[in-house]
Amino acid sequence: MPTNATRMAGPAIHATDPWTPGNPKKRVRHQLLSNDERAQLAKIAAIVRFEKGERIYNQGDRADAVFNIISGVVTAYRMLADGPPVMSFLYPGDLFGLTEEARYTNTARATTPVIAYKMPLQSVQRILSSSANLDVQVIVKLCDELRQAQHHAVLLVQKRAVRRLAMFLELQEHLQIARNEPISEIYLPMDRSSIADYLGITLPALSRAFRALVVKKIITTRGRHHVKVVDREAFKKMADA
Amino acid sequence: MPTNATRMAGPAIHATDPWTPGNPKKRVRHQLLSNDERAQLAKIAAIVRFEKGERIYNQGDRADAVFNIISGVVTAYRMLADGPPVMSFLYPGDLFGLTEEARYTNTARATTPVIAYKMPLQSVQRILSSSANLDVQVIVKLCDELRQAQHHAVLLVQKRAVRRLAMFLELQEHLQIARNEPISEIYLPMDRSSIADYLGITLPALSRAFRALVVKKIITTRGRHHVKVVDREAFKKMADA
DNA sequence: TTTCTTTTTTGATCGCCGTCAAAGAATACC
DNA sequence: GGTATTCTTTGACGGCGATCAAAAAAGAAA
């Protein structure tokens, strides 16, 4: 019954991916690139060094470059308005420097001394725009999936069930808007059990979380699949982590 | 002080991505594709229908196709040996059918009636292999990041702190192996506070989780940055969710 | 409708973890 | 080496959610 899944990814790249952690067949970075391509990369990528503890960029900064770690460990963290931060650790070969609306969405700092490629955003965009559209489409899709997975992680580090639920409802609302569907109500096609699993809580806990939001007059429910936000301000305060 | 970040993503694709949920500028699917490319896609993609509740594929099945939703909602879930499942909900435009070693890593079922493109894996691989290597590299990297983010979600859904810690240590060990580094010990370059944030627990809770593993003689610690697994079997049982 | 099944809610108890606080260790700095 | 700072551990307490169990509601089938 319940379930649990994870945002899915693209095509079966994995099967032949030499960079996957845990994959026994390890190869040297960039081995798959031709000399030409390597040269192209070298032209746009500068090699930069950071000492232990040094900030590489700050969340909210205007994004001007993407990084690829050569050696060392980078810790990236996204601060939320309230609640714990969401962390990730980046190792050699990892790309980082995710942007949203031209700004970094997280802060990156060197946990050990770090050497990395630094690629100006402009150059990367130029190269990508010369790619086949189909490839770009796949890349865009993967970025989407990645953002979804990250959002899921942000949701799951929240400790109180009501907040997770509020964040989930807000996400569903956003997805609905993105699909140009009416938004007077939030439509939840899945059953409670699936939602509970997605939120990483149990069914009774989810039920109580719903009740809490209703009692506080933040939402109303119509049947099982429709939710209406009646106190937008309180809702945003609850959901905006 | 700690932090929180999320695995990062690729280049600033986002800024111009019309498919991003929440992006006000919504466009029609495939708008960016030329007629040629659309024709190419049509040649390999079959349109398939699933009724409400129908399984699309099962976790562990040999993967033969990737899907792209045209309409309807799909619930994907990954079952773990123990503990709750990890869920995701997929909407029109979403890709799904992630594979690992040629097998699906999760189960997908139609939550509402679903219409989707079904693309044979072979065809997708053929198209991708004809792409520029640089693009493929980016795609591979993004798949990596995605897997990492998904693993993070799998970890965060676990309810007991010791299990999250065990999963984290196992991940670090795998990453170390992938980097061809010695693995007699697990090396943790980051501080406890960062680990606690990554695990979505507090510092005291992390400290107790470490202690619990040490007391149970599953690991030993040397200084702050080195951990050794001394009871491999118990460790695996603890970590393998 | 009536019945049966599935889903959801509610209740009660327990345990883990969050929270606050302080002591103890490791590191950096002088 | 000594001091100060930072990081980590330990302790006590309370709360939230897990767990178990049962009732209620919704949906499906007859």
Image (tube, coloured by chain):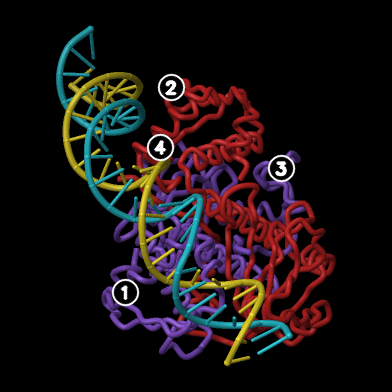
Chain colours: A purple, B red, C yellow, D cyan
In the rendered structure, the answer to whether residue A58 lies left or right of residue A140 reads left
> Please, is residue A77 above or below residue B42 in the view?
above
Residue B69 is situated, as x and y percent measured from the top left of the image, at 67, 78
Label 4: which secondary element: helix
- A17 left or right, relative to A97: right
Asked if badges 4 and 1 are on one and the same chain, I answer no
Q: Are marks 3 and 2 on the same chain?
A: no
The CA distance from mark 4 to mark 3 is 29 Å
Answer with the quarter of the image where residue B134 lies: bottom right
The amino acid marked with disc number 2 is Gly
Q: Nearer the viewer, mark 4 or mark 3?
A: 4
Q: Amino acid at mark 4?
A: Leu
* Label 2 secondary element: loop
**Mark 2 or 4, which is nearer the eye?**
4
Q: Which mark is residue A24?
A: none
The reply to whether residue B75 is in sight is yes
Of badges 1 and 2, nearer the viewer stands 1
What number is the disc on residue B206?
4
From the image, tell me which residue sits under label 2.
B223
Which x, y percent locates residue A18?
A: 72, 47
